[in-house]
Image: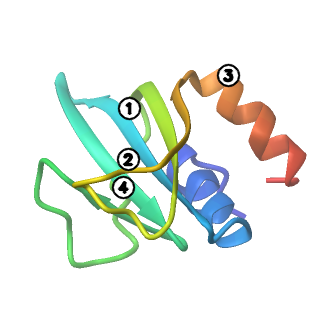
Amino acid sequence: MNNSIANRLEQYTIVRPQEVLLVTAEIAGETDEIAIFKGFSSSLTRSTAFDPDVPVIPEGAKIIKIDRLKSPYNPEAPEYIQQEMSWELMESLLEEVEI
């Protein structure tokens, strides 16, 4: 099983489909915002590869913060569950659901 950050976050949203994750990460020296929902990731600021095997959050990316939101995600009126989580806090949630 692939235990990359991207894969673990995607797996989390499969286990908890009522949530959307908004991840702010530093990738190659640039800040990117990624939405993850029901096992799929998509960059909100950069183009996303058509190939689902190309991770939107590559190895070496630095997670700045993660927001948990109720789905469906409405950018006009987001419903936050938890904001500005650190990677360490998110890891504890991943462990709770055995990911």
* Disc 4/disc 2 C-alpha distance (Å): 11 Å
C-alpha span from label 3 to label 1: 15 Å
**Real-space Cα separation, disc 3 to disc 2, in angstroms:** 17 Å
> Can you tell which mark lies on residue 61?
1
Instruction: Compare residues 33 and 17 and report the one nearer the observer.
Output: 17
Where, by quadrant of the figure, is residue 76 drawn?
bottom left
Q: Which residue is mark 4?
A: 35
At horizontal 20% and vertical 28% (from top left) the residue drawn is 31
Q: Nearer the viewer, mark 1 or mark 4?
A: 4
* Residue 47: image tag: none
Question: Between tags 3 and 4, which lies in front?
Answer: 4
Q: In the visual, does 14 lie left or right of 84? A: right
Viewed as shown, does residue 99 lie left or right of 22? Answer: right
Few, some or many residues within 10 Å of mark 4 (<14, 14–19, 20+): some
**Distance (Cα) linking label 3 and label 4:** 19 Å
Mark 1 and mark 2 residues within 8 Å of each other at the beta carbon: yes
Q: Is label 4 in a helix, a strand or a loop?
A: strand
Badge 3 or badge 4: first in the primary sequence = 4
Say whether disc 3 or disc 2 marks the residue closer to the N-terminus: 2
Which residue matches tag 3? 88
| Kind of residue indicated by mark 1 | Ala
* Cα distance between the residues tagged 1 and 2: 6 Å
Residue type beneath disc 4: Ala
Q: Quadrant of residue 14?
A: bottom right
Where is residue 68 drawn, in percent x and y?
54, 44
